[in-house]
Amino acid sequence: MPPTSPRLAYGYLRVLPGMGIDDVLRLQRDLVVFAKNNGLVLADVFVEAKWQQLKAWAEVVAHSRMKNVCHVVMPSPEHLHQIPVLAEIMRDEVEREIGGQLWLVEPFDETAAPEQEAGRE
């Protein structure tokens, strides 16, 4: 039986206010470890360096479609949006855009209603 291909993933993070280069490097390492622990191989990490821009995000979506990568790993919901409800909406939109799954190292708040997390891995 031939070996199976690795499940490729892209990483994405936004440089949030107050984050320094050490924080960004730590988060990148966290994404690599998380991906590996979940059977994924992180092919690249896209960093949104400017607050309130989506240039790196557009690159993630374009690369995901072009290379048929259907997994994106992010540090936490805050990298989608600062408002939790909007972050949840964006998560659904992201998964539609890439035709796959968005993995969060730090999941949505544990106080979320069970039906909000139903079907999430």
Image (spheres, rainbow, N blue to C red):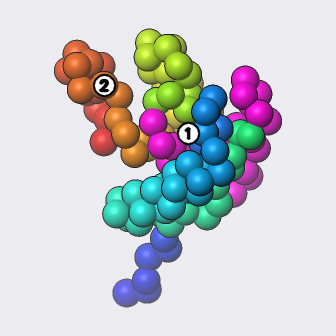
Query: Of the residues shown, which amino acid type is indicated by label 1?
Result: Gly
Where does the magenta region start and end?
A: 50-76
Determine which of the numbered discs, if any, sits on residue 109 in the image.
2
Q: In this view, does 119 lie to the left or right of 67?
A: left
At a point 48% along the width and 43% down the height, the residue shown is 75
Q: Where is residue 49 in the image (x, y as percent from the top left)?
A: 74, 40
For the C terminus, the quadrant is top left
Determine which of the numbered discs, if any, sits on residue 99 in the image.
1
* Mark 1 surroundings within 10 Å by alpha-carbon count, few (fewer than 14), some (14 through 19), many (20 or more): some
Q: Position of residue 105 (x, y in %)?
A: 40, 45
Q: Position of residue 67 (x, y in %)?
A: 69, 57
Q: Which of 19 and 3 is in front in this view?
A: 19
From where the camera sits, is residue 78 visible? yes
Sequence-first disc among 1 and 2: 1
Q: Residue 61, relative to residue 68: is it above or below?
A: above
Q: What is the CA distance from the residue labelled 1 to the residue labelled 2?
A: 24 Å
Report which quarter residue 59 is drawn in.
Answer: top right
- Secondary structure of residue under mark 2: loop
At a point 43% along the width and 83% down the height, the residue shown is 3
In the displayed image of the protein, which residue is found farthest to the bottom?
A: 1
Report which quarter residue 22 is drawn in.
Answer: bottom right
Q: In this view, does 46 lie to the left or right of 36?
A: right
Residue 51: within the magenta? Answer: yes
Q: Is residue 57 left or right of residue 107?
A: right
Q: Do the residues labelled 1 and 2 touch (CB within 8 Å)?
A: no
